Each structure stands twice: as C-alpha cells, then as structure tokens.
Amino acid sequence: MSDTNDRPDDAPEHCPGTQSDSAGKASACAGCPNQSVCASGAARGPDIGAEMVKAKMSSVKHKIFVLSGKGGVGKSTVTSLLGRALAARFPEKNVGIVDIDICGPSMPRMMGVLNEQVHQSGSGWCPVYIEENLALMSIGFLLSSPDDSVIWRGPKKNNMIRQFLSETDWGEEGLDFMLLDAPPGTSDEHLSSTGYLKSTGNTTAIIVTTPPELALLDVRKEIDFCRKVGLNILGVIENMSPFVCPKCHKASDIFPKNTGGGEKMCEEMEVPYLGRLPLDPMVGKACDEGVGILDKLPAINPIVDNIIQHLESA
C-alpha cells in the first residue's frame, strides 16, 4: 500500500503515490502529465524544476490566472485588456503576461507582436515588450510560423510551462503583476502551472464567463477546480454582456441570461462578481490589429478597481 502523504493534491483519485513501486505504472496514472517522471523514479527525489520555479517566482508579487472552463468566452481578450489596463494604471509597476495556452497561443496577435521572437541569454529568455512596463512570453514566439501547430502530449506541455515560469528574465526588479492566460478546461496546463505556483504564495484566479447557462455550466466546473487545488478566486468577469450598438448606442442582450447570468451564478457559488464587459465590435477589431482601446472601453476601469481591492484584502 502506498503512503498517501506523497500524493499531490491534484493527483487522480487512485494515484498510488510517487514513492510506490507502481508509480507511473498503475491504471490511474494513464493520462497524468507526470506519468513518465513517476515511472522513471525521478519523482522520488526532490523536484528540481519546482524549486527553480519557486526561486524565480519569489520576485513576482501577484500571480493571477485568467481561467474559464468554456472556450470562446473571450478569456484571452480579457487577459490582454487587463494587462494593458494594469500597465497604464500603474506606470511605475511591471506587468507580465504568460501565455500558457500551448496549443492555441493567441496573445502575440492580440498584443500586436505576432512576428516577434524571444532571445535567450545567460539570464534566460527575454520576453517581448509591448510597453516599457508590459511584457509577454508565449510559445508563439518560438514557432517558425504563426500557422505552425503544436501537437504535444502532457509531459512536453508541462516542461514548456516550467521553462516559461523558471527561465524567463523579467528584469532585475521582477514583476508586480503576472497574468497567466490559460486554455479552456481543467487539464494538463492547469494542473502543471497551479502545481508549480501553489507553493510560491500570492497566486489567485480570475474566471471569465458569458451570460448563457451553456457557458456557466463549465465555469462552475472551473470554480470547483480552483477550490480543489487551493487556488483563491479573485472573482468572475462576465464578458460580452450586453451588446452596445455602435450607431444608436442601445444595449441589447445578444446572449440570453435565462438563469440570471454570471452575477446570479456568483451569488450561488459565493464568489465575487468583478463586473461585466460589453460585446463591442471595437474590441474584436483591436484584438485582430493588436492595438489598445482602453480610452474607448470605460467598463474595464471598475473591474480593475475591484481586482486591486480584492488583491489588497487577499
């Protein structure tokens, strides 16, 4: 029988534990991003990668995951808006975005640096700077073409995320805010990144949804995931609510709120509601062109206010 004390908090239900002779070989290990490591016996010693991440992330004051259980809710759009808004609000502070959507990196285009590349030096990878105090790291910078597909299994994704977190050189002063743009769901990227960061302190999550119940069903699962892995939830942002006509400026609910939308869900799930962003054609156009539109999107300001308030009280 295995010692359950050596099981990670986010391990499968019947995980035999890293010290077991069947580690990485049991049926419960199938699909686990750490299966090959456990099977090799390397997991029985200290995790050097985790120690490297912990050392590097100690200089980052606030690490904020931007999550959603549902694809297509505008999570990456919200990440780009929050990154630009925080950098503009606090010009004396440093903001970094880490694109951990390994198979679908969209941040380079949204931030207007699609054809840039990162360079490696003795101190690590140099991220791409959008503003003097706003930088981005993404696998998109490591591909030979934006059309290249990334066809990787869990262990390789896990290793890339570890490299992003431990080998990116954010400068001598480090970061005040790090936003981690994650793919939809609760899978390899989420388990790897939260596993690496949960021991570094000041790690929280913002969850993005749209009003329909179809999106809220998956967002509820994301909230449950955060609670199971011990990730503090700053709150929920309701995106694409409502649509504002660019000509008559009349607001309409394109996506119905048959069950009360994100605000009602937050009441039921007992998580903070950070605010809503409208479905605005300007936002989509700005993301395609990689430009900022903060001056034309006042709805982002109270959301940033709420985020800062929750960070200070966390």
Image (tube, rainbow, N blue to C red):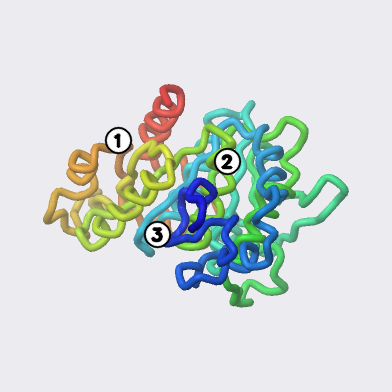
- Hey, what amino acid is under mark 2? Met
44 or 280: nearer the eye?
44
| Residue 247 visible in the current orientation | no
Q: Residue furthest top?
A: 313
Percent position of residue 57, x then y:
65, 38
Element under disc 3? loop
* Residue in the picture at 38% in, 55% down: 68
Quickly name the residue at label 2. Answer: 178
Quickly name the residue at label 3. Answer: 13
User: Which mark, residue 272?
Assistant: 1
Between disc 2 and disc 3, the foreground one is: 3
Between disc 1 and disc 3, the foreground one is: 3
Whether 256 is drawn above or below 250: the answer is below
- Hey, what amino acid is under mark 1? Pro
* Residue in the picture at 26% in, 50% down: 241
Q: CA distance from mark 2 to mark 3?
A: 31 Å
Percent position of residue 112, x then y:
61, 56
Q: Residues within 10 Å of mark 3 (few under 14, many from 20)?
A: few
Is residue 198 found left or right of 259 in the rendered image? right
User: In which quadrant of the rendered view does residue 230 lie?
Assistant: top left
